[in-house]
Image: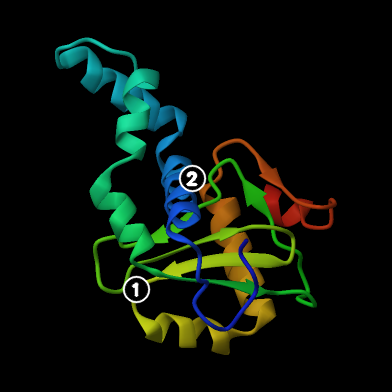
């Protein structure tokens, strides 16, 4: 459904909402967030589990509308000196989602990165970086924010990840 294109990815509303929910779920469904959700659920009647509260949180109208309102694109970095990594915290996000310069990224494969952004200048910035810098930046952030696991297609970047 998502295709590499210098243009914004255009999806039907339903798949776009589903993709936005999936992205938000990756941000929310971490052990530390689930613990915080459970603590809040324990303090607020009616009592429920984090698992019961999670669908409501993931379907936040404000967050989903914010995500689907962003421009979406994928960038192919085939030929970069390093393949893309992913981890147990694969979403790269700066400034949250509400700011005008908000953006997020997630590696989709060893050679493709998905970007969502609000400001078109970000698109131009990424386009001008080139495959090596995009790959290095994405891998650096993905490895840095990992808690336990980082994944790659082989062990060539093992030393980088260990450092």
- Above or below — where is 10 with respect to 28? below
Q: Position of residue 143 (x, y in %)?
A: 60, 52
Q: Nearer the viewer, residue 153 or 113?
A: 113
Mark 2 to mark 1 CA distance (whole Å): 19 Å
Q: Is residue 42 left or right of residue 25?
A: left
Q: Which residue is mark 2?
A: 22
**Residue at 46% across / 33% down in the picture?**
30
Question: Which mark sits nearer the N-terminus, 2 or 1?
Answer: 2
**Residue at 85% across / 52% down in the picture?**
154
Q: Is residue 161 left or right of residue 8?
A: right
Q: State the scheme by which the image is colored.
A: rainbow
Q: Nearer the viewer, residue 57 or 155?
A: 57
Whether residue 163 is visible here, answered yes or no, is no
Q: Position of residue 139 (x, y in %)?
A: 63, 61
Return the mark for residue 107.
none
- Above or below — where is 7 with respect to 16? below
Q: How many marks?
A: 2
Other-residue count near label 2 (Cα within 10 Å), few / some / many at <14 / 14–19 / ≥20 = some
**Residue at 65% across / 39% down in the picture?**
149
Other-residue count near label 1 (Cα within 10 Å), few / some / many at <14 / 14–19 / ≥20 = many
**Helix, strand or loop for disc 2:** helix
Q: Position of residue 40 (x, y in %)?
A: 22, 22
Q: Which residue is mark 1?
A: 118
Whether residue 2 is visible here, answered yes or no, is yes
Q: Quadrant of the N terminus?
A: bottom right
User: Most extreme residue toward the top, as rendered?
Assistant: 47
Q: Is residue 21 left or right of residue 132?
A: left
**Residue at 69% across / 74% down in the picture?**
76
The quarter holding residue 71 reads bottom left
């Amino acid at each position: 459904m998502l295709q590499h294109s210098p243009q914004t990815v255009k999806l039907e509303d339903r798949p776009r909402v589903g993709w936005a929910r999936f992205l938000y779920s990756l941000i929310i469904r971490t052990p530390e967030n689930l613990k915080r959700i459970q603590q809040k659920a324990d303090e607020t009647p009616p009592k429920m589990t984090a698992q019961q509260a999670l669908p409501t949180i993931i379907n936040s109208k404000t967050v989903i509308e914010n995500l689907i309102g962003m421009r979406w694109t994928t960038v192919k970095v085939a030929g970069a000196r390093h393949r893309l990594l992913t981890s147990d915290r694969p979403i790269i996000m700066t400034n949250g989602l509400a700011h005008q310069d908000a953006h997020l990224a997630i590696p989709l494969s060893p050679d493709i990165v998905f970007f969502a952004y609000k400001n078109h200048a970000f698109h131009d910035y990424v386009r001008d970086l080139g495959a090596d810098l995009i790959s290095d930046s994405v891998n650096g952030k993905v490895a840095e924010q990992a808690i336990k696991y980082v994944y790659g297609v082989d062990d060539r970047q093992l030393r980088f990840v260990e450092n």
